[in-house]
Each structure stands twice: as structure tokens, then as C-alpha cells.
Amino acid sequence: NAGYTGNWWGVVADASGQNPIQQGPTDPYPGMYVSTTSLVNSNYAIPNPLRYVNSETVPFIAIPTNVLASGNIIVGDVAYVYNTTTGQSCFAIYADAGNTTSIGEASIMTASLVGVDPDVRTGGTSQGIIDYVVFPHSGFGQGYIPTIAQIDSIGNLMLATVGGPCIASCIGPVYNNQPPSTAVNTPAGWDTTSFTATFSDINNGCSAGIEKTFYQVSDYNTNNEWRANNANGFFNDDFNGSAISPGWTSVAGTWAISGNALYESDENSSNTNIYAPLAQNLSDCYLYEWTGTMDGSGNNRRAGFHFFCDQPDSSNRGNSYFVWFRLDDDKIQIYKVINNSWGNNPVLDTAYNFTANQSYDFKVMYDRISGVIRVYVNDVSCAQWVDSLPIANGSYVSFRNGNCNYKVDNFKVFRSRSSSALVSAGTGNGNDIRFENHDPATPAGRISSVVTDRMRGISAVSDQYVNTDFTHPSSPLAVNDGTASDIDTTFNGTQLEANWSACADPNSHIRAYYFAIGTTPGASDVIPWTSNGINTSVTVTGLTLMHQQQYYFSVLSEDSAMMQSAVTVSDGQLYFDVTTEAGLHSADNSQPPLLYPNPSPGVFTIGGTFSGDFSMTVFSQDGKMVMNETREENERNVDISSQPDGIYFVRITAGGKTHLQKVVKAE
């Protein structure tokens, strides 16, 4: 279908017009002719196939010349192509003229996307089931071939203005403008490390579906402020402190915290500047939100916001975008700043009726891939511009005002996301959530979500608070054998007792203590690890203890985040069975030492025949050691008169043998 010698059409011929130019070995289709389209990329020469729109990779349509004038359509405009039978649809651009009699030509890719056989020889349809909705002056115009992402972005915005995809034909668009909604879901309980947040985004009504999805992670710091990690592409400042956060740098103007808001009070300055660093290359799309109020006594009052800045100290922030709200001129303006100059005119100038000293919720959305900039005022889309050469990176944001007072509050920055997001949490500065709960009732993390639909509707912000604890609880400073102060010996063969110092966890509090009993330090061969609730003492009954066996208590604490402390072990208590000891003496015919007088007022003598030095230990009935001495053979008198009345056990070791005797102290 390319014609013949002297009458070639739709292909590029040489200067003589006699010979079509064939694509070379490095071109997309070597050996094929160079097929032309009305829309071209002016960066490439006429013989280069990249100059023209590729039918296999770009959705486009052809429109007869007799339609163009009546529709005020220009090359590069965006269209919505809709299969009225199957409901399949796509966005496309007007890229070629087509024949002069009928509408219907489309690229191979367009046919594929709307469910029509794309074969150029046998495909297509004659059923009249395909509708084109073309939006005049919606594209980039001649000289630029947009990406599919840019085509889709513009198409979605344009389609929303006429009712969205509820269009069943070119007649009678039907839609409602109910905004979308969103919700955040996080794991139940406490978060001790990174976790995944999931999002439920709902397209309410007929609004062409969810367009963009955003999230923000903020944390509650030690200054009782909700902040966010700007190195991770998030920002949050409620300006509730007594002074401006150190993260901000004031360059021009008089900026201060006043009434829990950031306030600039120099009406004489025509270009104030306060800026903060912010990574803006971690997601495809960013959403900036703040509450702004303009007032003052002048007649040229204005205020605004720079984003994607690379030179924040410069008068126009180097390279950046700038949204300007003009109070007295009643305008919203968008500027693109290149090399610190924004030229003579804004790239977009839109009317908006502002009122002095009235607070407005401003939201600015920027897609660094498609170049779409959209401005919301009080959640209503009020201005939009698409940059064909979008700025892809930015390191700062900046507030600015001229000849007015400007109040800024609740500044937040969101990043685009998918249906879930990994939230890093921990004490390191690189995490999204860097702080722990101040107490169990004060969450330290917050996940926020907001979405837009394809009719430019925007949801309310949904917040989900999370409790965080990254620190293990403290361990007991000491574990004492016995019910009070530490004992070393017990004479009860069926129970063991212990007590310990209370532990602490300021973030999530102690939920339980666990203990174990073993015959070696740290072992649990007698009693396995067992919860003791929040009690700091325990009596374990029903045991069968072994004579002269040492027993050790091990104790740890656990907080509400289910993290456990290190283990603290007692120094042990020896079980001494008096009956068994007496039986051993009888078996080897040894005579135990005699204690007299018994009972005594507290002074008694150790009788019996044994030679050499001996060791003597006196225990109270509850196992507390009250005396422990090594004596010479003739040092037989013992004085425990300072001890309270009661039963005491005296353990004497001499000549390689140990004897245990009972003495009663009574006044």
C-alpha cells in the first residue's frame, strides 16, 4: 500500500522521489520502508524511523482532515478509544490524517488494546462498535511523541471532565463525583522490627478507578513531635514546638513558630525563603499537603511552595517547580524554574477566589515520570499542568511568600505506593519509624494513606497508629533464694522459694516474669520455664529434693511486645535433709556433736570428740545463714543470742565428715 515509483505515499523517499528509503541494520525494522505519520519527533531527521510514531508500540488513531476543523483538533491530541461491545478501552493520540471519508483507522497497538483483530491485512471490524472521544488541544502538539504513561495520564484527566469511563457511547455520559476512600492495615500487636503495611483503596461510584495511591510514615519523637524521615522521602511537621525545627533553614523573611504554626511576618519582603531537605526520587509520584493562610495590609499579597528544588538558597531555588497562590489577583499559578529563572510567564494561570485570613488545605501532586502537576484546594482539583520534560530529581522543598503574612501548618509529604509497603522500624536513623512508644498508651508510629481517582477526586487521609518497642526489658538485678533476703540452705524437701527485684520497660511495660529451677546455674531440669504473672516471688511445692543437692532459680522478664530480658540466676540453695543425715551417722557409728544446753538462751557449747580445726555454719529454720566460721578444736562456744528465738540448725564439718544438729533458742 505504499504506492509506486513517482507516486509514493506514507513512506519516506529519497530526494528524487523515485526510491523509498529502506531502514538500516540499526533501525527498528531493517530492510523495511520508513513509514511516516503526521505527528513527528522533531529531534530526529526525516529519514530516521524514530521520527515517526510506531504503530506496534504506540496507541494512536488517524482522523480525516474534514473532521479536524469542526472539532478544533490538532495533531498530538489525546483520545479515548472504547469498544462498546466488550467494554475494552485505551487512550491514544491523534498521530495521522487517515482517509477523507471515514473515521476508524488506528494503530496496531490501539486495535489490540480494545479487542479488535490487529492484523493489518485481515483484521479490523466493520461493526461500528468503536467510539472515539477526542479532547481538543489536550496533547503536547507537533514535534513530540509522548510516552504511554504520559498519554494515559492526560487521558485519565481529560476523561474525568466528561464523566469518566461510564460513557457507553458519545451520548449521555453518566457519573457521580463521590471521592475514593482508603484504609491502612498493619499487623496486630506491637512492632519490634520492620513490618508490612497493606492498604485498602476503594473507588466509590463511577470515577474510572483509582488513579494514584500515596502513603506517609511518621514517628513520635522524644520532643513529643510527630516527624518523618525526610531521607526516606517523607516529611511531617505540625510546628507544635516552641521553635522551628533544626531541619528547616531560614534564608529570607521573618519566620517563627506562632500559635502552633509556622508564621512569616515580614510584609515588606517580596521573596522569603525557608527550606528543608527532602529526598524526592524514591517514588514515581509525590503529594505535598499543608494548611496555608495569607493576610496582611498590601494589595499584592501572594504565597506559595517550591518542590523538586536543587539549589534551595537561590532566589528561585535553582531548578524547581513553584505553585503560587495570589490573594489579591485571585489566581493559582504554576511556574517551572530552570537555572534559577522562571521566565516571563507562568506555565499555567488559573482563576481562584481567595479570601484573606482564611485557612486553605493545599495539596500539590507531582508525577516525575509523566510530568503531571495538579493542585487541590480544600480537596477540589483546581489547576493542572503537564510538563513534557519533567524534572526527575529534587532534594529540597521551600515555602515562599511575598508582601503578605503567611501561616503554614501541618506540612506533610506522601510518596506513591502499591497495595502494600514495607515499613522499616528500629533505632537506626535510616528507618521509617525511629522511635519507641513513650509509654504503652502513646503510639510512636503512624502510617497514613491518601488516594486519587481518575476524575481527580481525592480521598480523606486515613491514619493507622502503631505501637513500637525495640528494646528488651531489664533483667532482675538479683534473684534471692527464699522468701526474703537470700538463703543458702533449705530444710524443706518438698518446696523451694525465691524472690527477685522488679524489672522495667518504659515502652510497653512488663507483662510477665518467667522462672525455672535447675541443679546447675541456668538449668531447668527440675522445673521448666514457667510464667509467674507479674509476681516477683514464687513458692514451688510438691517437689522431691535430694539431700545435699544445690538448687538454682533462673528468672527473666517479658514485656508486652513479647521481648524477653537476659536471665538472672540465684547463687543457689542447698537442701539438707536432717533425717537422712542422722541415718548416715548411725550407719558409720560416728557420734554427732552434742549441743548443750538445748534449748538455750542463745549461748551453747559444741561437745563431742573430734580433733583438729572444724567449720561451723548456723542456719535459721528458713535457711538463712546467720553464722559461718572456721574454728580451732578448742573453740567450742557459740553465741547466737542476738538472733530471734526459734529453731536453728548447726552444720559442723570435721575430719572429712559433716554433721547437722538442731538447737532451740528460747529466752
Image (spheres, rainbow, N blue to C red):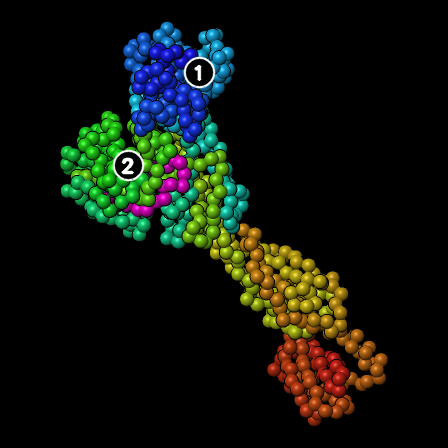
Q: Residue at x 35, y 15 (%)?
A: 18
Residue type at mark 2 is Tyr
Q: Is residue 133 left or right of residue 199?
A: left
**Residue 321 has which mark?**
2
Give residue 207's position: percent from left, percent from top: 42, 22
Q: Residue at x 35, y 8 (%)?
A: 100
Q: Is residue 417 left or right of residue 134?
A: right
Q: Mark 1: few, some, or many residues within 10 Å (few <14, many ≥20)?
A: many
Which residue is found at the position 51% from the left and 44% from the top?
195
Closer to the N terminus: mark 1 or mark 2?
A: 1
Image quadrant for the C terminus? bottom right
Q: Quadrant of the N terminus?
A: top left
Compared to residue 367, the image places residue 535 above or below, namely below
For label 1, the SS is strand
Q: How far is disc 1 from disc 2 in space, using C-alphas?
A: 35 Å
The image shows residue 656 at horizontal and vertical percentages of: 75, 84
Which range is magenta?
273-289
**Image-based side of 277 in relation to 577, left or right:** left
Residue lying furthest bottom: 634
Q: Name which quarter of the figure residue 387 lies in.
A: top left
Q: Position of residue 303 (x, y in %)?
A: 23, 37
Q: Is residue 383 visible?
A: yes
Q: Which mark is residue 82?
A: 1
Name the secondary structure under disc 2.
strand
600 sits to left or right of 289:
right
The amino acid type found where label 1 is placed reads: Tyr
Disc number at residue 127?
none
Counting other residues with Cα less than 10 Å from the Cα at mark 2, is it few (<14), some (14-19), or many (20 or more)? Answer: many
Above or below — where is 36 with respect to 522?
Answer: above
Residue 66, picture quadrant: top left
